[in-house]
Amino acid sequence: MAMTLRLTDDEADALRARADLEGRSMQEVARQAVRDYVERESRQDLLDRVLDRELPRYAQALERLGQ
């Protein structure tokens, strides 16, 4: 699926500089950034869901440990 990504001049310059430094295309660097973001946020969402479910079960014990 194709999409258009509109960047400011500063963002495009920074992306171009990074891509040049790595010897990769701007598209490759941008696509990797999207993959990294999705993976990181997905892990955080999973952790948040687990903590929301499990912390109440252990709230009393955690409170006692904090005293």
Image (spheres, rainbow, N blue to C red):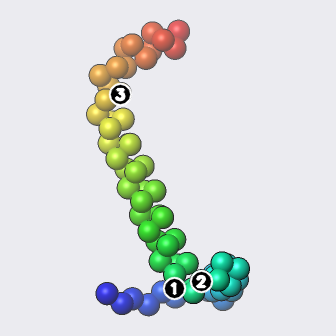
Name the residue rendered at 29%, 34% in the picture.
Answer: 53
Q: Secondary structure at mark 2?
A: loop
- As drawn, the label of residue 27 is 1
Using residue 2 as the reference point, say whether residue 33 is left or right of it.
right
Name the residue rendered at 44%, 90% in the picture.
Answer: 4
Amino acid on which disc 3 is placed: Leu
**Residue 54 on image: x %, y %:** 31, 29
User: Which mark lies nearer to you, 3 or 1?
Assistant: 1
- As drawn, the label of residue 24 is 2
Label 1 and label 2: CA atoms lie apart by: 8 Å
Name the residue rendered at 46%, 56% in the picture.
Answer: 40
Q: Residue furthest front?
A: 23
User: Hey, which quadrant is residue 13 in on the image?
Assistant: bottom right
**Residue 39 on image: x %, y %:** 42, 59
User: Which mark lies nearer to you, 3 or 2?
Assistant: 2
Using the image as rendered, state which of residue 37 and residue 49 is in the foreground.
37
Name the residue rendered at 31%, 87% in the picture.
Answer: 1
Using the image as rendered, state which of residue 3 and residue 25 is in the foreground.
25
Can you say whether 19 is above or below 35 in the image? below
- As drawn, the label of residue 55 is 3
Q: Earlier in the sequence, mark 3 or mark 2?
A: 2
Classed neighbour count for the residue bearing mark 2: other residues with Cα under 10 Å, few (<14), some (14–19), many (≥20): few
Label 3 and label 1: CA atoms lie apart by: 41 Å
Q: Secondary structure at mark 1?
A: helix
Amino acid on which disc 2 is placed: Arg
**Residue 11 on image: x %, y %:** 64, 81
Using the image as rendered, state which of residue 7 and residue 39 is in the foreground.
39
Q: Secondary structure at mark 3?
A: helix
